[in-house]
Image (tube, grey):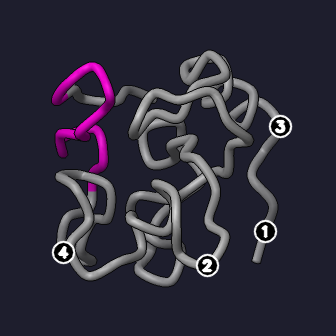
């Protein structure tokens, strides 16, 4: 698996502003691919979000990998363009751009 390019990583962290993009709390953040790499997802700013911890499937990152993730947190294989899929951000539903 290839590493997320530093420019993409920096842009996602800048967009997050130190807060989980799911719940809005200040916490250690992990980068999550909305369309998983195993499903053909790419390392793009629109496809990656910063979510609070995974630990024991808790936090927003655990929720993103659960059976009923919030809107736009986990995209199925057939949807090829994350910029066209709304994401339930702590501000509300938004489109993410590359």
Q: Do tag 4 and tag 3 residues touch (Cβ < 8 Å)?
A: no
Q: Secondary structure at mark 2?
A: helix
Q: Tell me which numbered mark, 2 or 1, is placed earlier along the sequence.
A: 1
**Of 5 and 10, the residue lying toward us:** 10
Q: State the mark number for residue 97.
A: none
Q: CA distance from mark 2 to mark 4?
A: 29 Å
For the residues labelled 2 and 1, say whether their Cβ atoms are less than 8 Å apart: no
Indicate which disc, 2 or 3, sits on the residue closer to the N terminus: 3
Figure quadrant of residue 46: top left
Find disc 1 in the rendering and name its residue.
2
Residue at 28%, 38% in the rendered image: 83
Nearer the N terminus, badge 2 or badge 4?
A: 2
Residue 78 is tagged as: 4
Q: Nearer the viewer, residue 43 or 17?
A: 17
Q: Within the magenta stretch, is there residue 73?
A: no
Which of pointers 2 and 4 indicates the residue nearer the eye?
2
**Mark 4 to mark 1: distance in Å?**
22 Å
Residue at figure coordinates x 46%, y 72% from the top left: 36
Q: Horizontal and vertical percent for residue 72?
A: 23, 52
For marks 4 and 3, give the CA distance: 28 Å
Q: Position of residue 50 (x, y in %)?
A: 57, 41
Q: Residues within 10 Å of mark 4 (few under 14, many from 20)?
A: few
Residue 31 located left or right of residue 70: right
Of the pair 48 and 70, the residue shown nearer to us: 70
Callout 1: SS = loop
Q: Which mark is residue 56?
A: 2
Q: Which residue is mark 3?
A: 6
Say few, some or many: other residues with alpha carbon within 10 Å of mark 2 (under 14 / 14 to 19 / 20 or more): few
Contact, mark 2 vs mark 3 (Cβ under 8 Å): no
* 88 part of magenta stretch: yes
Region rendered in magenta: 81-93
């Amino acid at each position: 698996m290839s590493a997320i390019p530093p420019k993409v990583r920096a842009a996602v962290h800048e967009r997050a502003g130190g807060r989980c993009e799911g719940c809005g709390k200040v916490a250690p953040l992990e980068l999550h691919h909305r369309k998983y790499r195993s499903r053909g997802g790419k390392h793009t700013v629109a496809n990656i979000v910063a979510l609070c911890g995974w630990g024991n499937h808790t936090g927003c990152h655990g929720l993103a990998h659960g059976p009923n993730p919030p809107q736009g947190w986990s995209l199925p294989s057939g949807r090829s363009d994350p910029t066209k899929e709304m994401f339930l951000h702590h501000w509300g539903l938004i489109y993410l751009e590359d």
